[in-house]
Image (cartoon, coloured by chain):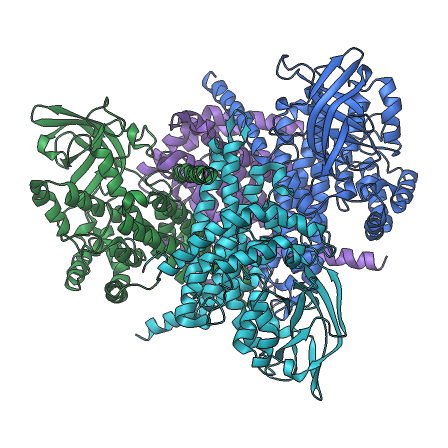
Chain colours: A purple, B green, C cyan, D blue
Amino acid sequence: MEFAFDARTLGLRDNLLDFMDRHIYPAEAVFEEELDGLDNRWAWDSSPTLRHLRTEARRRGLWNLFLPGENGAGLTNLQYAPLAEITGRSPHLAPAVLNCAAPDTGNMEVLSLFGTPEQKVQWLEPLLAGEIRSSFAMTEPEVASSDATNISTSIERDGSDYVINGHKWWITGAMNPNAKILIVMGKTDPDAERHRQQSMILVPRETPGVRIERAMHVLGYDDHEHGGHGELFFDDVRVPAANIISAEGDGFAIAQARLGPGRIHHCMRSIGLAERALQLLCARADERVAFGKPLSEQGVIRSWIAESRVKIEQLRLLTLKAAWNMDVNGNKAAHSDIQAIKIATPATVQWILDKAIQAHGAAGLSQDFPLAYAYALIRTLRFADGPDEVHKDALARAELRQQRAARSAKASA
Amino acid sequence: MEFAFDARTLGLRDNLLDFMDRHIYPAEAVFEEELDGLDNRWAWDSSPTLRHLRTEARRRGLWNLFLPGENGAGLTNLQYAPLAEITGRSPHLAPAVLNCAAPDTGNMEVLSLFGTPEQKVQWLEPLLAGEIRSSFAMTEPEVASSDATNISTSIERDGSDYVINGHKWWITGAMNPNAKILIVMGKTDPDAERHRQQSMILVPRETPGVRIERAMHVLGYDDHEHGGHGELFFDDVRVPAANIISAEGDGFAIAQARLGPGRIHHCMRSIGLAERALQLLCARADERVAFGKPLSEQGVIRSWIAESRVKIEQLRLLTLKAAWNMDVNGNKAAHSDIQAIKIATPATVQWILDKAIQAHGAAGLSQDFPLAYAYALIRTLRFADGPDEVHKDALARAELRQQRAARSAKASA
Amino acid sequence: MEFAFDARTLGLRDNLLDFMDRHIYPAEAVFEEELDGLDNRWAWDSSPTLRHLRTEARRRGLWNLFLPGENGAGLTNLQYAPLAEITGRSPHLAPAVLNCAAPDTGNMEVLSLFGTPEQKVQWLEPLLAGEIRSSFAMTEPEVASSDATNISTSIERDGSDYVINGHKWWITGAMNPNAKILIVMGKTDPDAERHRQQSMILVPRETPGVRIERAMHVLGYDDHEHGGHGELFFDDVRVPAANIISAEGDGFAIAQARLGPGRIHHCMRSIGLAERALQLLCARADERVAFGKPLSEQGVIRSWIAESRVKIEQLRLLTLKAAWNMDVNGNKAAHSDIQAIKIATPATVQWILDKAIQAHGAAGLSQDFPLAYAYALIRTLRFADGPDEVHKDALARAELRQQRAARSAKASA
Amino acid sequence: MEFAFDARTLGLRDNLLDFMDRHIYPAEAVFEEELDGLDNRWAWDSSPTLRHLRTEARRRGLWNLFLPGENGAGLTNLQYAPLAEITGRSPHLAPAVLNCAAPDTGNMEVLSLFGTPEQKVQWLEPLLAGEIRSSFAMTEPEVASSDATNISTSIERDGSDYVINGHKWWITGAMNPNAKILIVMGKTDPDAERHRQQSMILVPRETPGVRIERAMHVLGYDDHEHGGHGELFFDDVRVPAANIISAEGDGFAIAQARLGPGRIHHCMRSIGLAERALQLLCARADERVAFGKPLSEQGVIRSWIAESRVKIEQLRLLTLKAAWNMDVNGNKAAHSDIQAIKIATPATVQWILDKAIQAHGAAGLSQDFPLAYAYALIRTLRFADGPDEVHKDALARAELRQQRAARSAKASA
């Protein structure tokens, strides 16, 4: 057991921390202004600042860090996790500048693992180069998104094509006109075994029948900095059969593969956001005087600071351990660890943000600090791939099974 | 001791509940659409629907219910509280339709109690008639708003005028061009005794030197349905000396008087919002099926429902008791009771809203349900006239004083 | 609506508060010492101090206050509740001195309402006179006590007798040799309708076949001041048929009747204990200096004090309202209100005690303060007649039913 | 970074787990019975079962595992921590059997590090051999134990002796007549620099003037299984000057050294107790049926199980990381990490125990399960070397300092 980072991680961390200080933080406000000035507020990746920073990130070797294997930086989950954390401190800008922003990361992983050579050339390469964006269309309004087997979108074979019909929402990034490709999850065979009914298929944004109805809001935000969250209809959308990913019936398995590392990334970025909130809380506590002394000399504020620090340390260790477990034992073996970080992270970071906001007074809820937006971002994570309660239930069932097994082993010993 | 409402309250409740069902709830969506279609999105009181509903409210005798005495409905706090609660279920629309919306209510109370006959004719009468709106400019960015003695805006006598210089923000309603009059809190005598330095003065919106800089956002919302929250500069703003309210040095005392009933109203409306959230939670729990059974058959959701109900009952009783105490013993005697509801209400309603949102999944954070907006509204109440922590500290000091007195009395008995 | 106590309540409160100050608090330590010195530590009602104080209580008219109707003081629940609260501040001594201690109160109510004239003469009269004690034997180890229909003890008719077989535990007071009579709940007809299978029967302690196995402990306490909590076996215990209470099959209904007011009493006494804890917390906070200033000047401690006060006020109002509802509308109509106080009270008072203990340091857990013992007492209330979770579930089901009804009413309007 | 245990730890874990299953758990009840049967209930180490198990533990090499260096097993903190955890599952018996029970462990560390050769022969050797027991007398009733500089016991030089006068309480183990040696903390020079006033001195139990006044209780328990917690008076207690440990003025520094690893051990044992509670909770949830289905199929119980697992994982990682940090960077560098585990562990384990108790109903509070006793044990840890609030305050101050330093570094970059 050893809690120090390895040399490669340390090197990349230093590089990234320096990049954040020199380039990312100073550019945050400019980036937001540029987006407000765009003709299409969703086309965030046309920001000149973003493009300029991307060049610098590539020059520094801070590009596609998320992607294991030879297409990417080749980092393990354990190596990438602390870097994802740092990008999370500037969630609108840093992940995008490093080409490490969701949902593209997950989509690139899917194409990298399961794409045909043709699919890779057409879609993976421009994604890896940061030239286009993508979306992942899974969530549907009529069914509990936590139960992937419920999906009702149909993908029907018709000659050399597939025809897609369905209704999706909360499709992150889909409002951005540069999100050229959608990975759509639907059912190719509703009569197959429960986890073999689903397939994923590539649908170019411009295909006839794809209708982008509206943008969903999150607590007053439209998240245009991420390309928003679209509600989409698919009406007789026809794509070539070659657009299927992997094979018919593989959709559920691909989704499982996609969500593991993705969740590690989400959690680590959230921890970065919690660190930033704690920085802001401490700075505010030193600056703000109430009733004759700075907030930092008031016991209640100090207890928030201490509890925030203790919570962050625990979350980070839990997430790093899950990353290590995935690297060493595989995603399946690490399933309960992944579920544990899904349960712990959003709720805890929400708590920390609430305290940081409270110490800022009404300003903490306003556009003058990144706390309110961060709150909205983290709050959505409590449903993002299934609500907290579903993860708790699943983890509890796993725990009960293990305890039962241990009791039987003991009884028969 | 008696927990039933009196006859007048019961009559008004029935009337109001019927009005809500027939007129308010069905008009909510239309009202929002009308506002989105306005040239000036802040001018909410030009909505045709609002105007039409106001006529009906007046016809039913549901007008200015908040105002005690002959200018208003003449209700006690205890009689008005359960009515305010009902309006809180539709917070964008119902209080405004009944001319019972903040900050106008507090301003009308101030003018009613402390205004000169001329001030009443010029400002109170059109406010009571719902013809104009008003704002209350107290909060300043540089100082802890919880400590009113810190105010830095200056109100200086200059011949027959006062000249005002200062910087205010979070001035609710001030973005609305129909907010014709501002009550501004500032210091007329920084050398006077601590609670006699402040004065309030009437500043017509159109006075030269009044600059409305920008609108503050709350968790992504601009609250245009309430006229927003303005950041304002006062640069050598000159008004006649007759615009002073009551007299120089009375500002602190008027603020205290204004905030008592105002807080009761806020709290009761918040409880109404909690009731609506619980309604939505129960409806959702019945409709939504996950893992083979409705949410309403799942234990965790049921525990949220039960705890919400128990919390709401307690909050309501606490607030009604504070209202009763103010009516019977006066605002000063009821000070700790008022502080208690300030402490309990926003935090508790925030909890309930969080659960209701969680049961709705991502939809709960979206524009499709009133929950996300309600969350933003309630979250701001945790600072609205001083953060939770300040109220707790004050209540604790009062408790410690009382316990000390009881111990001495016992010791000397 | 009116939050002041009526004249009779006020008079009794003054009387009782004076009695507590003059007689109860000064006698607490002596009473505990006397019990430690007894040959039979369970025979608490042989304490000379207790007997002496009882005389004084009777002289003052502070006797059997709990009992409505002509046998007792004839108070309503709403009148008795604030008196019960005061006795709860000294839970070992005050309720016993006033002959208002559980489980005798519930048993006297049962006999008063459902006893035959002979049963009343034999058992109710000496109980009302404080000459003997009683126990209520319902809880069984093998079944969830929250589900009264599960009871497995059998009461079988055999000629002119009933024969009882069963196993009970947590039978409060049963270790006291002066607990001369047991009310035993069992099944007379396992084949009857679900709520008609149970009966209650009077079993004199000395009946052959009654075996008192051991005393149950609660967090290290044996609660001998209340006669402990016995584990009992009933092996072919034979009593005359006339010992049945009311009639065969009435057991469930009697239990429901018994638990309503009993729970109000428990909750009010718990609130009294919370008040005492807050007194101790405030006194400690003033006395104890840490890091150069008294605890009462430290923000975290002050936040505990404020939150405790706010919680106590809410609990008290909730409980008084439930008492009022029972008086005015009957126990059945007040069912959800009773459930609400069961849910809210123990958990909240546990929180307050935990904070008071924490402010006392290790001494707070010791025999030097009444806090640790109070903690054990309150902790058991979270199961006393069914665990919190069962009450929450039931309350939620009632809420869901009401909301459904309201939705249908609206839909069909 | 690496989350697997090393080979030596794995070997000892297997050995210890086997020992627990074969020897410790089956002996728990017998041990308690033996203690109840002793003439002196405090003399727990005269239990035959204990002595027998100690022989087996030594045979297996499971002896003095806690002690680094050549006197003990030579394990690092990181290696010992997971073993301490396992012993914590049976807190009355396992640590004692392995000669790894507090307060002897800390005392042996002090003697090992700071004792003279004579002191080692006389006291360390019999302690290492498990022949005698010891106590550590630091806490005093009149002062906040969290502030060691406040200690009022005096140690005055008088010729070739020291004379000790003072009043101590909560001296764990001191009721046991076999606790032959006390390490007493007092002041040798009240005028010295703040952290140089204190000294530690060895006082044999039988020295004239040592008076053991009474045993302190913890939530109704006297903890005789650990030798109780004594209140002691030292009245002109005279010991040779050679009994001083290290040198005059070293007391504070020795205490700091002693508490670091001690706290790691406490926390790891507490985590073991939490694991046992979770085992019991899962077993109970499977066995107990309420309302027609096992508790393990009820959502609320499952949420407790999941949250308990997530909390335990986080606590364990936090504690292991603190152990690693102490090993690699020293106790001083690890100070905030140690404070973090002090803050997190007792409160979290208390939560888990509360849930496990709740699932057991009243039985969970009784002598039939180890949960109630465990609750008392863990609750005391929230003050054991300073209350939670003191640790939070200190951690917050350290965090604020670091954040200030980071801000200045950035500002000057």
Q: Residue at x 87, y 18 (%)?
A: D117
Q: Residue at x 66, y 84 (%)?
A: C241
Whole-percent x, y for residue A386 in the image: 53, 54
In the picture as drawn, the residue positioned furthest to the bottom comes out as C159
Quarter placement of the N terminus of chain A: top right
Horizontal arrangement in the rendering, residue D334 relative to residue B161 (left or right) = right
Whole-percent x, y for residue C242 in the image: 64, 83
Q: Is residue A174 visible?
A: no
* Residue sitting nearer the eye, B85 or C381: C381
Tell me: residue B51, above or below residue A311. below
* Residue sitting nearer the eye, A31 or A358: A358
Tell me: residue A175, above or below residue B168. below
Whole-percent x, y for residue B46 in the image: 17, 51
Whole-percent x, y for residue C16 in the image: 47, 54
Q: Residue at x 88, y 29 (%)?
A: D126
* Residue sitting nearer the eye, D135 or D83: D135
* Residue sitting nearer the eye, D164 or C128: C128
Task: Tell how many labels.
Answer: 0
Q: Is residue C293 visible?
A: yes
